[in-house]
Image (cartoon, rainbow, N blue to C red):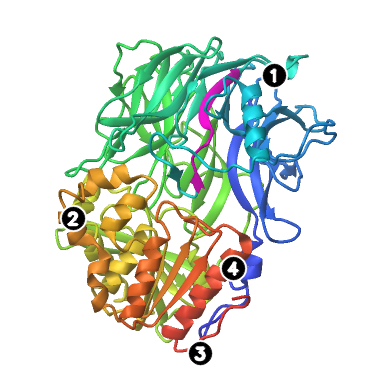
Amino acid sequence: MPESPGSPESSAFSDLTEFIALPRISSLALSPDGTRLVTVVSELSADRTRFVGALWEVDPAGERPARRLTRSGRGESAPGFLPDGTLLFLSSRPVADPGEDEDDKREAALWSLPADGGEASRLLTGPGGIGEYATATGASRIALAAALLPGAADAEQDAQLREAREKAKVTAILHESVPVRYWDHDLGPGVPRVFTVADPAAASEPPAVVDCGERRISLYEGMALSPDGSLVAYAAAVGTLPDELRGVIVIADAVTGKQLRVLESPDAEFAEPAFTPDGRHLVCVRERRITWDEPGDLTLWLVDATDPADPGHDLLPDFDNWPHSPVVSPVPGEDGTPVVYFTADEGGHAPVFRLSAGSGALVRLTTSGAYSDLALSPDGGILYALRSAVDSPPAPVRLDPAAPGGEPVPLPCPGQVGELPGSLTEVHTTAEDGTALRAWLVLPSAAGADTPAPLLLWVHGGPQTSWNAWHWRWNPWVAAAAGYAVLLPDPALSTGYGQEMHERGWAHWGGAPYQDVMALTDAALLRGDLDPARTAMMGGSYGGYMANWIAGHTDRFKAIVTHASLWNMSAFGGVTDFPAYWMRRAGDPLVNTERYDLESPHLSAAKISTPMLVIHGDKDYRVPIGEALALWNDLARFEVPAKFLYFPDEGHWITKPNNIRIWYATVLGFLAHHVLGEEWQRPELL
């Protein structure tokens, strides 16, 4: 890895081989009795070519070290519990003693691990695998999502049709509605459906499966069972024309499969359902659909689970940020109404909030960090979560939900990364329109007035997100270990700064966001420990769009890295995986080209002189590879010094360990050449 003068001593962040080997924590599940807490720890496979997840048990009291529960070559994910303490998880691991005609299909199945220990056993499977499941706190019923091929009435017919396709070597998919792809995978040929199974572990014969209805497509995630297992709610999609497609929540009788109501609106999307303790009501996220004039807006919605006449009502009418991942306390508030916990981006953090549904009283529980995977003890008195921050990876913690501003208690678990190669601070300034702006600034250890560090501006994707959590794929500490200061701005369109921040950038993605990014860069470079003569810029997805926009509108940077980036907006809108979104925001390109002409980076191609590194994966369906090919061709046409790092088997994100290593090595080598003046060194294996 290229190093700048004064780089810190070796650490996991200065050795890419060590960096990709660091354990990674995700997911959190609490047993119904509150005594067991399970997370997923992902580590490198023995051949160091894959990340493999394993289930680990974490002591809720924080006294005992975590212990590993599972081990397999294909890994485990999505831990959950049945009321009797049986641990569930998804895995494509083979069974220990397969039957004579039982092939190893490598599809995800639902597995169980007894509460008192023993070997894991495969509980439920299907010809197309299981994609998601949910359990009830007071009943053994399980809800799960699985796909059936068109024409299949049940799993048996589905298996026959899949076998026929496989024998005939047919891979074609006939689509009769949109969309056809999502992020990095093709949709179909199976159609997602939701099923429920009552106590599959207790059945001596194959358990009875209840079909609760077609999910249509798996764009909208979220599934929940009522505490007694009598109702199931799941996110689905309705509509056939691109602009009609929207997310709804279907509520069905989990025992019979009869649909009881569909929560929908022509101007809103619904997702992330969670039942109240009595099972009669549902809390979910309601998102106002975007229009030409207005960005979306999110809130929490409370609705009667079975009464189609109840439209529901807004639980957060005065909350200016976007709530996510609602979790309803198993214990109602003193007034008998639900108590809801949720997270929302806010000012460079993602705190936990507590909402009393009856009074509307809202309390911010945490002061710093980004939280996810909330889980409440049975008495509602302890809250568990994963906490991360820009300077700390995800780790399980315990919180007191009755103590606002209390410090989270860390729970022993793998995943520590050691000492960071620098420190974290903030940069503040004011936009031209008077809006307060802020950014995180990662400073390398050696930065000082006598040794000012080169600055790397790194713009986040989204664009409606925030730099507030740890990122393994967009990790600024790797750059800090190479001697760079890294500026992580939250410009217009970022979350956590109120609805006005979205509105400022909505009409022109290259307008206020670009101006904010430049203003924060100027503010950072007033520091004496940064070198204004050695600056670079990079970004991925929307950050890649901004990289391309910046390249055509200023030559102030020595180098620009653009990953999975948008280049020709009118061409992009029709080939991305979800064209309806772009048409609603930017208009029909056959009728109104105003925004396409205003904000498409490719129209400034002839003005680019800054050296650029283009990076793209061929399996990226959100920003298809054609964007990178067109950009690369234009850079060559106008003789811009450039390189193209192409990943034939990766999508929007680079996920394979050795590809990740090459990604970082190439980025740092490119920056070292153009920013630090070092000789270009072609990364190993390229």
Magenta segment, which residues?
185-196
Q: Which residue is mark 1?
A: 200
Amino acid type, label 2: Arg
| Residue 121 higher or lower than 599, as above or below | above
- Disc 3 is placed on an element classified as loop
Residue 235 part of the magenta-drawn span? no
Q: Which is nearer the eye, 493 or 392? A: 493
Mark number, residue 595:
2
Q: CA distance from mark 2 to mark 1?
A: 54 Å
Label 4 to label 1: alpha-carbon separation: 43 Å
> What is the quadrant of the C terminus in the image?
bottom right
What residue does disc 4 label? 661
Res 679 label: 3
Q: Which comes before the other along the chain, label 3 or label 2?
A: 2
Query: For the residue carrying disc 3, how many other residues have a C-alpha within 10 Å: few (<14), some (14-19), or many (20+)?
Result: few
Q: Secondary structure at mark 4?
A: helix
Q: Is residue 566 above or below residue 10?
A: above
Q: Measured from the top left, where is residue 435 in percent x and y?
A: 19, 56
Of marks 4 and 1, which one's residue comes earlier in the chain? 1
Closer mark to the observer between disc 3 and disc 2: 2
Q: CA distance from mark 2 to mark 4?
A: 38 Å
